[in-house]
Amino acid sequence: MTEIASTDAPIVRLVEPDGSVVGDVEVGLSEDERRELLRLMIRSRRLDRECWALQRQGELTVYPPFEGQEAAQVGSAFALGPDDFVFPSFRELAAAVVRGVDVVEYLQYHRGTWHGGPYDPIANGFAPICVPVATQIVHAVGWAMGAKLDGKRACSLAYFGDGSASEGDFHEGANMAAVYGAPAILFCQNNGWAISVPLAQQTAAPIADRAAGYGFPGVRVDGRLEDGGPSGNDLIAKRLRPAFRAAALPVPGEGLDVRESVTSRLGRGRGRCVGPRHGKGRQKERKRGNRRCVHERPPRRLSDARSRKGCTSAGFVSGFRHLNLRTSRGIARAT
């Protein structure tokens, strides 16, 4: 990823590539909660790989993989409360898992079923998959404004990529939320590429710095390796450091901010679109990242750190192997 010079937004990083701590990670998480975070990350990565295989077998019509971004999604979704609402793009399977969405029901959208998936968005606080670029940002701000008018202590969380930050919907949503004090969190997963367009050709400054122009906070969480390669993904930093739930603030509705999660996606953009349109630069960076043996990070990095402290074991990780088979059978039975 081509580095963009930072200006005002604070940068948060807590964990080194080997799992060692470089900051204060005591953010009120118990060992059980830390194990649960690790469990969710491992499950999400295994599901992502299985879904990619299902797409190549023709069981899914299209599937956008997210390998390398697990910490960004799991950490942020884990911080939300039951009354909060998530507005995803089309690449947030890990966040859906955290919110309790049934995976087979979620994937029926990618299978091309006529109803687009039967899971209940209200029950899980997880809106339907949004494919148009950046429109979910406006949806999230609208929901947040409604929650404020209703007097709810809840916030919305909109996931989007760095490419979405180049759309007018980002500006319109951020400006309206700022003017009306909507409790919305705009969470950018910046992996450095909008399909085949690198970040340096999209913006001259970090995305989090834009928050100052709207009059609300922006924080940049750098989860890459020290050499700028993929998948540092500081899970705890994205979870609660700094604390980011708008609903936890003393005054309901005063919780707008932008979180820019600097991460890397190791896989391709999406199934059915894996040819030249991805761009040679994007493919070369992905191959370099793979050669750096980062396929098992961040789950392996966090797992190693937990194992050294006696919090997990080999059996803890191997216990997730049955999930792939169960998902495959569920998709095969879906109509």
Image (cartoon, grey):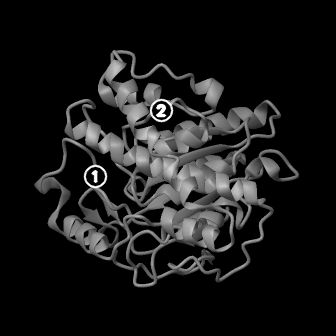
Nearest the camera: 161 or 76?
A: 76
Nearest the camera: 143 or 225?
A: 225
Question: The disc labelled 2 sits on which kind of residue?
Answer: Val
Please rate how many residues cluster around mark 1, counting C-alpha atoms within 10 Å: few if below 14, some from 14 to 19, many from 20.
many
Question: The disc labelled 1 sits on which kind of residue?
Answer: Gly
Quadrant for residue 216, please give it: bottom right
Residue sitting at x 42%, y 43%: 47
Placement of 136 over or under 263, stated as above or below: above
Quadrant for residue 218, please give it: bottom right
Residue sitting at x 27%, y 42%: 53
- Most extreme residue toward the front is 315
Q: Which residue in the structure is indicated by mark 2? A: 103
Left or right: 282 in relation to 298? left
| Cα distance in 3D space between marks 2 and 1 | 20 Å
Residue sitting at x 19%, y 46%: 273
Residue 48 visible in the current orientation = yes
Residue 269, numbered circle: 1
Nearest the camera: 182 or 303?
A: 303
Q: Position of residue 99 (x, y in %)?
A: 61, 38
Placement of 228 over or under 160, stated as above or below: below
Between tags 2 and 1, which lies in front?
2
The C terminus, quarter of image: top left
